[in-house]
Image: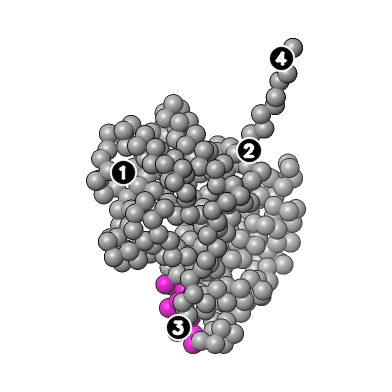
Amino acid sequence: MWKPYKITEQVRISEMYSLFEARYDYGYSFAGESHDFWECLYVIDGGIRVSANKRIYNMKKGEIIFHKPLEIHKFDVTGKEGARLLIFSFTLESDISDFFKNKVFALNEEQKNTVSDFLIFLRKEAGASESSREIKYTGLLASSKYSQTAVLYIYRLLLSLCGENTVSYYSESPDAAVFYNAVNYMNSRICEQPGIKEIADYCGTSASSLKRIFFKYSGLGVHRYFLKLKINAAAHLLENGSSVCETAEKLGFSSQGYFSFAFKRETGFPPSRLTKKSESS
């Protein structure tokens, strides 16, 4: 008798939004953003500084970061020779997704080979050269054959990363410390409306320096960044059963109408989508 062994699916990518590689010159700064799906940055060559919510990382060749949904992120090219990146974004349905949050990974040789094989496949199917400044692979995603093959490479990488190769360092620069402390303070006052001077005083800096630091690491003003933190907190409350009205009131929004407007502007969808999701789960 043959005994069947049930295969439990650990990782599932149901949608992809972007897939490309590009070379950026020294000093290039990507504007800060957040969205409701995962995004990955892999450093093929060169060096970048990445902000991921309150954390600042100095990343080099062979390192990879996964930005979780609604994470406020930005990158700047710090390598003198520039940087070449592989970037892809996707919807991840996985019991192990929490493992990839708030981490940077240094790939071992086998994992680097997985990415290298992935790039060889993509370039071949796109008819592109490694020397191209930017190669967009989103056209391949329209084909079930190529999109599924691409996802298999990502599965292989994700599964190989579980439980190892975490890089836990943060930037230790004075500006990074101020940014980290400021975001911590904002989160501790998420249901209130602290002013810029109050936050700056807590961090031991001036209001003008605080504004400069926030733009440097997030591409956003202090107030806009705080609003995004509130929206992230709102998403968590809504997913855990809080109503739109209760959430708006708890987080100190002036009205339910303004909360719904701000939520949709920042996320691209209304808060009711998350209340329906929590009711169906």
Residue 89 point in image, percent of width and height: 47, 46
The amino acid marked with disc number 4 is: Trp
Disc nearest the viewer among 4 and 1: 4
Q: Earlier in the sequence, mark 4 or mark 1?
A: 4
Q: Which SS class for mark 1?
A: strand
Disc nearest the viewer among 1 and 3: 1
Residue topped by disc 2: 10
Residue 281: image quadrant is top right
The amino acid marked with disc number 2 is: Gln
Residues at discs 2 and 4 in contact (Cβ within 8 Å): no
The amino acid marked with disc number 3 is: Ser
Residue 225 point in image, percent of width and height: 52, 69
| Viewer-nearest residue: 220 or 106 | 106
As for residue 163 lying within the magenta part, the answer is no
Q: Which SS class for mark 3?
A: helix
Disc nearest the viewer among 2 and 4: 4
Q: How far apart are marks 2 and 3 (CA)?
A: 45 Å
Magenta segment: 206-216
For residue 135, the mark is 1
Residue topped by disc 3: 209
Residue topped by disc 4: 2
